[in-house]
Amino acid sequence: MVKWRPRASSLGYYVACDARALWDRSKWEPECEEERTSSPPADLGTVEHFLLQDGMRCSFPGPPADHAPTAEQLASASELFGGDETEMLRIARKTTVKAAGLMPKISGTWHAETEILAPFMTGHLDFLSPDFRLFVDLKTTGRPPEGRRVKREHLVQMHAYYLLIRWKYRVTPERGYVLYVDSRGGSWGMLISIDFTTDDAVGYADWLFDYVRYLRSSTLKRGAFPRLSTKCKDLFCPYYHDCHGSIVPPSGSMSEAPEVPRIANAGVRSLKELA
């Protein structure tokens, strides 16, 4: 039986909270290893990814139609536009045009939807050059990254792809690109590159490989800690409600602020007297 392997796209979330990795691992089933979470925004991203890949005449593993969004995904994405599929496709094509204008130029044809199943991790690459030295990950989103810098979770994901390419093709990638594009019509776009020839990038990838080994080890059960923060929702954690509901003290508990004034009014005139 295949042992649980983290997805490259999830690693950034695990770095933020390794308890999420522990919960994912405990619920894992081999037949569902590559199962994706569906939602209208995610399905709109699927539509826009395929329109760009097919429009650029990328090379798919198998017929392009096998990678096209399903009728259910089209209907789901259309919910963002009042159920109007025609309007959804019109907006998605505008996003695609913006993204196509920002794609790096290469000699040859991009490979699309390249799946890599390494013994330690899995991943799908949106775009991979024929010589395996360049790759691009498309991020359709409603909000650009701050300061024109790669988001932390995406930086982790890109280094994971770097490791997967090195493992499968025995080639060291030279550069990876994160292509951020407005998902609602391409009003803005941003291409950010990562230079994998630097010592810092290679060192970070080496650290990440060790981290993946930790996630798959028995040590995870002892070391994982739920890192509650205000960004749990932004990281789309599926365990957000259960985790916060079980850990955050409920109303009326001893930890509530109303207990503090009773201590403050107990005759203490300065903080020094508390020592």
Image (cartoon, helix red, strand yellow):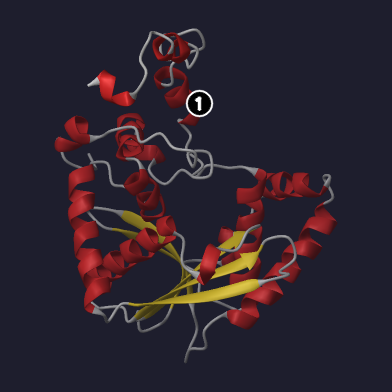
Amino acid type, mark 1 = His
Residue appearing at x 39%, y 8% in the figure: 266
The N terminus is located in which quarter?
top left
Quarter location, residue 99: bottom right
Foreground residue, 126 or 219?
219
Q: Nearer the viewer, residue 96 or 245?
A: 245
In the foreground, 95 or 61: 95
Residue 102: where, in percent of width, then height? 60, 80
Q: Nearer the viewer, residue 203 or 213?
A: 203
In the current view of this chain or complex, which residue is farthest to the front? 269
Left or right of 42 on screen, residue 203 = left
At 48% from the left and 31% from the top, the residue drawn is 240
Whole-percent x, y for residue 146 in the image:
54, 63
Q: Is residue 239 above or below residue 211?
A: above
User: Which residue bears the numbered disc 1?
Assistant: 241
Q: Residue, x 28% and y 46% (percent of image)?
A: 5
Above-or-below relation of 114 to 16: below
Question: Which quarter of the rendered picture does the C terminus lie within?
Answer: top left
* Image location of residue 85, percent across then percent down: 81, 53
Q: Secondary structure at mark 1?
A: helix
Q: Is residue 273 left or right of residue 219?
A: right
Q: Is residue 120 left or right of residue 7?
A: left
Specify whether 146 is left or right of 176.
right
Note whether residue 54 is visible: no
Image vertical order of residue 100 relative to residue 230, above or below: below
Residue 8 x, y percent position in the rendering: 36, 55
Say whether residue 79 is visible: yes
